[in-house]
Every structure is written in C-alpha cells, then in structure tokens.
C-alpha cells in the first residue's frame, strides 16, 4: 500500500512540474490547463490518502499493543513519525489548490500570470518537501510495525 501511495504522490508532483513547464513555454495553454487540473486532483488525492494510511497504521499499532499486551512507546513513536506529514501535507494541498484557483483567475484575466507562476513554484516546492517527509514517515512507521511484530511473535 505504501508503494501505491508513493507512486500517486510522485505522479502528482511530476504532473505539477510538467504543468509548470507547459506554463513557462506558454505555447500550449490548453494542455497546461488539462495537466494542471489532473495533477492537482492526483496530488490532493495522494496526500490525503497518505494521511489516512498513516492514521490507520497508528491505530493498528495501538490495537496490536493492547491485544497482545505489548509494553513500550511504539504508539507514541508512530504518532511522532506521522505528525509532520499532517502539517506539510496540508500546506502542500492548500498551496496546490490555491495555484489551481489562481490559474483560473489568470485564464479569465483577473490576475496577471506572474502571480500564478510564483504560487505554482511554491506549490511544487511544498509538494517536494511533503514527499521527503512522507517517505521518512512511511519508513519510520514500517520500522515500528516490524518492532511490534517482533514483540508479538517472541
């Protein structure tokens, strides 16, 4: 499941970068808009599913600890590992949505393209930061789950 979520996040971020390239070139605005809408949806879906997945991992660890009387701070550690994902993931999703909304304002002539461009660069940066933190959280949570499983099986 983690691999599927990371694939979705990478597809979304790659789409955002591709969309930015189309926007910079300015030659194929319809493709820029189509890629932008699709990439925004994929990015939002992938980040939100990542958050739900990490919530489920934490709940599973907590339930396993209670059911098998496992001592330790595993539930606290998994909560600490997933905590940064919620903050940066939310910021990444918000900036991505604002980019799409401002893009529509550029299309209708309400805002100049440079405003959209700078917010888009911020969205790409925030999404790359989110990917880095999500990978770290997935790695840490998998390690914690392995430790809990070893405790249960021993």
Image (cartoon, grey):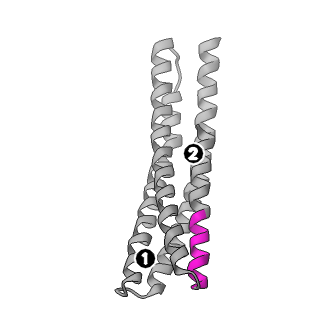
Which residue is painted at 41% across and 65% down in the image? 97
Q: Earlier in the sequence, mark 2 or mark 1?
A: 2
- 62 part of magenta stretch: no
- 25 part of magenta stretch: yes
Which residue is painted at 46% across and 58% down in the image? 41
Return the x and y of residue 145 as percentages of the image width and height: 59, 28
Which residue is painted at 43% across and 56% down in the image? 90
Looking at the image, is 57 positioned above or below residue 23?
Answer: above
Give the labeled residue for mark 2.
5
Helix, strand or loop at disc 2?
Answer: helix
Q: Quadrant of the C terminus?
A: top right
How crowded is the residue under tag 2: few (<14 C-alpha within 10 Å), some, or many (20+)?
Answer: some
Q: Quadrant of the N terminus?
A: top right
Helix, strand or loop at disc 1?
Answer: helix
Residue 66: image tag: none
Return the x and y of residue 40 as percentages of the image width and height: 48, 62
Report the front residue among 126 and 49.
49
Give the labeled residue for mark 1.
103
Q: Which residues are magenta?
A: 15-26
Give the farthest residue toward the left.
Answer: 110
Which residue is painted at 51% across and 45% down in the image? 50
Report the front residue among 152 and 122.
122
Return the x and y of residue 75 as percentages of the image width and height: 49, 29
């Amino acid at each position: 499941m983690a691999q599927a979520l990371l694939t979705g996040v990478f597809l979304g971020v790659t789409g955002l970068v591709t969309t930015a390239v189309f926007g910079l070139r300015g030659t194929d605005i319809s493709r820029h808009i189509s890629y932008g809408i699709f990439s925004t949806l994929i990015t939002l879906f992938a980040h939100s599913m990542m958050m739900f997945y990490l919530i489920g991992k934490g709940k599973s660890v907590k339930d396993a600890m209670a059911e098998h009387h496992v001592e330790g701070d595993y539930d606290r550690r998994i909560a600490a590992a997933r905590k940064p994902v919620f903050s940066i993931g939310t910021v990444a999703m918000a900036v991505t949505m604002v980019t799409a909304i401002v893009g529509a304002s550029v299309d209708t002539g309400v805002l100049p393209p440079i405003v959209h461009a700078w917010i888009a660069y911020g969205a790409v940066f925030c999404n790359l930061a989110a990917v880095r933190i999500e990978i770290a959280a997935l790695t840490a949570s998998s390690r914690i789950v392995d430790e809990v499983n070893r405790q249960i099986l021993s």
